[in-house]
Amino acid sequence: MSNYDIFFHKISLIISLALLWLMLSGHYTPLLLLLGLLSVLAVTIISSRMKLITYDQPILQLYFIRFIPYGFWLLIQVIKSNIDVCRRILNPKLPISPRLISLKSSQSSSFARMVYANSITLTPGTISIDLDGSNIEVHSLSLEGAEGLKTGKMDKKITDSEAQPYV
Amino acid sequence: MTAIEILSGILVILGSLSIIVGLLGVYRMPDFFTRLHAASVIDTLGTILILFGLILYAGLNIVSIKLLLILIFILITTPTAAHALAKSALHGKLKPMTDDD
C-alpha cells in the first residue's frame, strides 16, 4: 500500500469520525467542538499506530455502501422468517425438524463472506455455526429454512452487490 | 393523540408481544441450538419493531438518528454473539439434536 493510499485512508477516517461525532453530540459550543476534534485526532493517531489503516479493501469507511440495497431486501426476509418461527413456536405441536447443512459461499472478499454468514444468523430459523474457507455450516430449525438457503438466492444477492463497480 | 403517536404505540406493543413469543420459544424448544433460534426472534423482530416505534415517536431529530444507529449496531452485534455461542457450543462437543429422515 502506497503512502498516498494511507494518507487518503486517514483523511477519510477523520471525515467519517467527525461526521459521527457531530451527529451524536448535538452540542456545538467552541469548547466541545475542540474536544471533539481532539478525540477524532486521537482515534486516528492510535489506529494508525496499531496499523489498522492498512486494510485490503478500497476505502474501508465507504465500502459498506454497496450493501445498502441488499440490506432492505434482507430486512423483508428477516420479517418473513420471524413470522414463520413465531408460528412454529405458538403451534401446540411445535413443528420443528432441526438439521445441519453445509453451504458454499461464492463471495471473494472476507467482508462479503462476513455479511453472508451474519445474514444467515440474523434470519431466525438459521444460524451459521462454523466457517471454513468458503464452506459454511448452518444449523436450521426446519426443512423449509434449509431448502430456502440451498437455492442460493441470498448468496447470489451478496455476490452481486459485492461486484458493483462504484466506491 | 395524533395518528403517528398511535402508530408508534402499535409498533411498540407488537414488539413487546414478539419478545413474549420469543421467550415462550426459549422455554418450549428442546435443545440449546433450537433455543438460539427462538432467541433470535427477540433480537430481530422485537428490537426492530420497538425501535421503529420509538423513531416514529421522536420525529426527525438527533434522537431518532441515534435510535437508528442503535438499531444498526444491534443488528450487527447480535448475530455475531449468536454465532459465537453456537460455535463454542459445537466445539465444546455439544451435539445438535437433528431430525434427518
Image: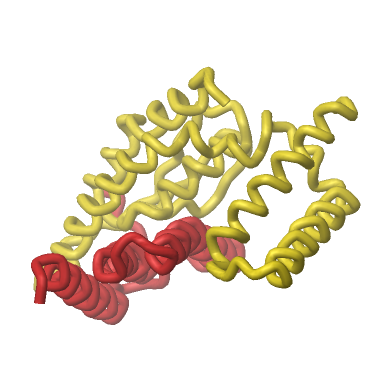
Chain colours: A yellow, B red
Looking at this view, is B68 or A73 the one in front? B68
Q: Report the quarter where the N terminus of chain A lies.
A: top right
State left or right for residue A24 relative to residue A150: right
Image vertical order of residue A141 relative to residue B22, above or below: above
- Res. A61 image quadrant: top right
Residue B41 visible in rendering: no
Between B86 and B30, which is closer to the camera in this rendering?
Answer: B86
Q: Quadrant of residue A86?
A: bottom left
Residue A63 percent location from the top left of the image? 58, 35
In the foreground, A19 or A101 = A19
The quarter of the image holding the C terminus of chain A is top right
A56 over A32 or under it: above or below: above
Q: Whole-percent x and y of residue A3?
A: 89, 29
Total marks placed: 0
Q: Position of residue A82 (x, y in %)?
A: 24, 58
In the image: residue B68, left or right of residue A162? left
Task: Name the residue at 85% across, 27% down.
Answer: A4
Residue B80 spot, x, y in % from top left: 53, 59
Q: What residue is drawn where x is 34% and y is 62%?
A: B44
Residue at the farthest top position:
A165
Q: Is residue A35 visible?
A: yes
Q: Which residue appears at 66% of the width and 38% of the height?
A: A60
Describe residue B33's horizontal placement relative to residue A2 as left or right.
Answer: left
Viewer-nearest residue: B62 or B90: B62
Q: Is residue A130 above or below residue A25?
A: above
The residue shown at (40%, 50%) is A100
